[in-house]
Image (spheres, grey):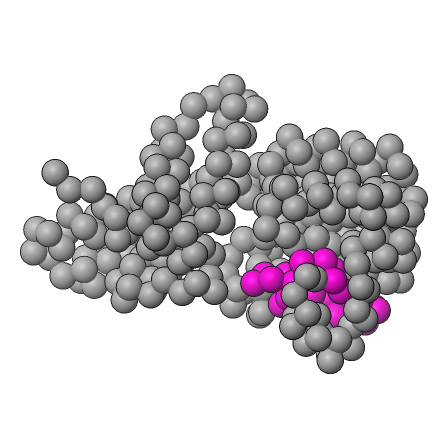
Amino acid sequence: MTTEIKRIGYAGLGVMGEPIAANMLRKSGLPVAVADLNPAPVARLVAMGATDAGSIGAMAASVDVLFLSLPGGEQVASVMRGNDGILARGRPGLIIVDQSTSPVDLTRELAAEAMAKGMQYADAPVARTRQAAIDGTLAIMVGAQEPVFNTIRPLLAHAANDVTHCGDVGCGQVVKILNNMVLFETVVALSEALALGTAAGVDGELLFQTLATGSADSFALRNHGMKAMLPGNFPKAAFPTDYALKDVEYALRLATYTGHRVPGAELAKARMEKARDAGFAAEYFPVLSRVVDTL
């Protein structure tokens, strides 16, 4: 597959999508069209040199690679299958790259529908923080046929310093969903450790600092634990409980898809639901540490 990329599009300019699109705009040297329901990030990127595409359908008809960064699979399916959507308006040869976190089974269905119309499809969900998205140091897990991966990898590298080809379509979502599952379960364990330690008379900061010197050290401890749980910092602009709950449900959906049961993920879901029901749906998901059970 040899595809000359002359124009790219980016749809979904939220917490992660806007800085990713900005990096592609600055570094690729290519014209970039953008679209979002919120006019503010569109205006910021237009001020940097992007073009306002007006709609995802219009973008699909005019670009060579179309990136999506949407809240989840439901929104991806809607923009793909809508009357003015990508499947209806995308031209043959278009490469669709879903950077959202979407269910594996849905990803493979949409890829088959795109390929039936002469388009290509890749899943390329992202990991790490918004600051990493700004800095261009994300981790991106890609599911795609190898020729498609080779075509899009240079573009993804503008936003990431780790781009991994995980296998065929859907495999990027598998790895991202499992990454999040492990993160969520670790955050639950940290919330329990913090509750038990402080209740037993150990200072929370000392506890986490000491854990960081031993085998309990982790990215989650140093970020979600030390930067969110300890100071009680759960901003609404970060990854909210509702989004995390959606992602852990994708892990449970993947477990059903593969014929497994995952009690750790089930526990994480229950804890997130408790946080949501306590009024923390919009807060950064480590807020679940505020709803630890007591006897």
Q: Residue at x 56, y 40 (%)?
A: 175
Does 259 appear above or below 183?
A: above
Estimate the x, y position of residue 237 in percent, counting from the top left: 47, 65
Viewer-proximal residue among 84 and 118: 84
**Residue 280 is a magenta residue:** no
User: Up-down: is 40 above or below 4?
Assistant: below
Magenta residues?
A: 10-35
Q: In the orientation shown, which residue stands out farthest toward the left?
A: 201
Expressed as whole percent of the image width and height from the top left, the position of residue 23 reads: 68, 69
- Report the number of discs: 0
Specify the farthest residue to the top.
259
The image quadrant where one finds the N terminus is: top right
The answer to which quarter of the image holds residue 76 is: top right
User: As rendered, which of 158 and 45 lies closer to the eye?
Assistant: 45
Q: Is residue 121 above or below residue 235?
A: above
Q: In the picture, which quadrant includes the C terminus?
A: top left
Residue farthest bottom in this picture: 47
Q: Residue at x 59, y 51 (%)?
A: 71
Viewer-closest of 185 and 72:
72
Left or right: 257 with respect to 107?
left
Residue at 65% x, 46% y is 75
Q: Is residue 215 visible?
A: no
**Residue 127 visible (yes or no):** yes
